[in-house]
Image: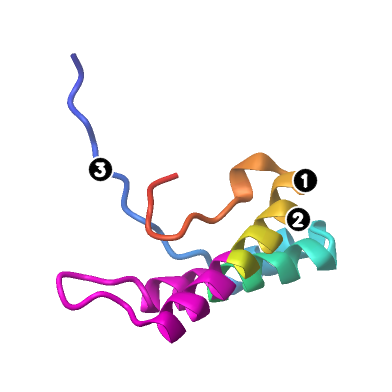
Amino acid sequence: MSPIIPQVPVPIPDSVASLIDSCMPVHVLQAEIDAECAKREALHYRPSFGPLLDNEDRADREYALADLARANKVLAAYHPLLIVRAGGAR
């Protein structure tokens, strides 16, 4: 069995990112931004090893997860590998 080599994220130069962005429709780019924001918001309300979330925090987390699902629907329609998961591996 071959050894598992960890993948290290490499920064993309701004000029390359601009070329990639120019090839994608605007609504897909906006959905990508919305998905990342919703993911960050949902992870903010995730209970760690502390006390459980109260009702208001649970409702806020559900709204964030709904926003993430809405953005992922647009991303998956464009390309299934673009979906964003909240706190999980791809």
Q: Residues within 10 Å of mark 1 (few under 14, many from 20)?
A: few
- Amino acid at pointer 3: Pro
Magenta extent: 38-65
57, above or below 69, in the image: below
Task: Check if residue 62 falls in the magenta segment.
Answer: yes
78, above or below 65, in the image: above
Instruction: Mark 3 vs mark 1: give the one in front.
Output: 1
Residue at left 32%, top 78%? 53
Q: In this view, does 44 lie to the left or right of 49?
A: right
Residue at left 42%, top 81%? 55
**Number of residue marks:** 3
Instruction: Mark 3 vs mark 2: give the one in front.
Output: 2
Determine the residue located farthest toward the bottom in the rendered image.
56
Q: Tell me the quarter of the picture where residue 23 sits.
A: bottom right
Cα separation between marks 3 and 1: 29 Å
63, above or below 16, in the image: below
Q: Tell me the quarter of the picture where residue 47 sits.
A: bottom left
Q: Quadrant of the N terminus?
A: top left
| Proximity of marks 2 and 1: CB atoms separated by less than 8 Å | yes
Give the SS element for disc 3. loop
Rendered image: mark on residue 6: 3
Give the SS element for disc 2. helix
Q: Is residue 18 left or right of residue 86?
A: right
13, above or below 23, in the image: below
Rendered image: mark on residue 77: 1
Q: Measured from the top left, where is residue 63 in percent x and y?
A: 58, 74
Task: Check if residue 67 falls in the magenta segment.
Answer: no
Label located before the other in sequence (3 or 1): 3
> Depth check: 80 or 8 in front?
80
Q: Mark 2 points at which residue?
A: 74
Residue at left 20%, top 19%? 2
